[in-house]
Amino acid sequence: MGCVTRVSTPQLLLACLMILLPAQPAQARRLRSVAPIHIRMQTYVGDKPVGARPEFSWRVGFEGKRYQLHITKMLVLTGSTLPLSIDSAVSMYPVQFQLIGEKRTVQQFLSTPPGELVQVGAYVRIDNTSRYLMLDRVAPAATATPGSAGGASQR
């Protein structure tokens, strides 16, 4: 018969652990859920007016088209994330976010006239494979109330 090697139980357990342990962190990274970050922002869609000084400028994609956003104010409503951290996480991409939301809300947002400041309530979702800006509410900045997409007096 062939040569049979005796393996002790501790050696067998060690071999199994060496095979299974590296797979767990990789699998956990793939399965980890990323919670959306609730934000409120004031932004121009398209061209910004002369003299406007945005904090951030993002490009968003919707149905194969790109739109420019010039964000003058942003407030993170959930968690301890800073607006600058969100911008830093997406600034390296040519299109920072894919735009999603209810059809009526997205159309209202995209049909904003150039130079008009709007208040937007949204959720940002950033993970290893995708970046979404999920629109919740859109209102003209001049008529927005604190209970809607954001108060003009709040920062």
Image (tube, rainbow, N blue to C red):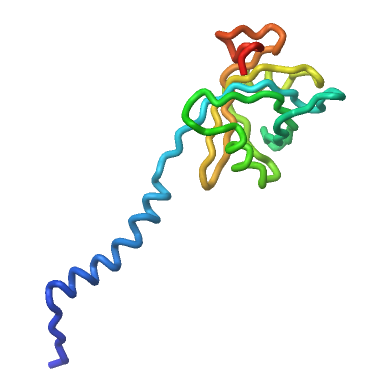
Residue 86: x and y in percent read: 59, 36
Q: Quadrant of residue 3?
A: bottom left
Q: Quadrant of residue 73?
A: top right
Give the total of numbered labels.
Answer: 0
Residue plotted at (24% across, 71% down): 15
Say whether residue 152 is left or right of residue 9. Answer: right
Q: Residue furthest right?
A: 50
Q: Quadrant of the C terminus?
A: top right
Residue appearing at x 57%, y 35% in the figure: 132
* Residue 91 against residue 121 in the figure, above or below: below
Residue 122 horizontal side relative to residue 21, left or right: right
User: Would you place residue 35 above or below residue 145 in this image?
Assistant: below
From the viewer's side, name the closer residue of 139 and 110: 139
Residue 72 locus on image (x, y percent): 71, 25
Q: Is residue 99 above or below residue 90?
A: above
Q: Residue at x 60, y 15 (%)?
A: 149
Residue in the foreground of this view, choosing between 98 and 146: 146
Against 67, is 102 above or below?
above
Left or right relative to 14: residue 29: right
Quadrant in the picture for residue 114: top right
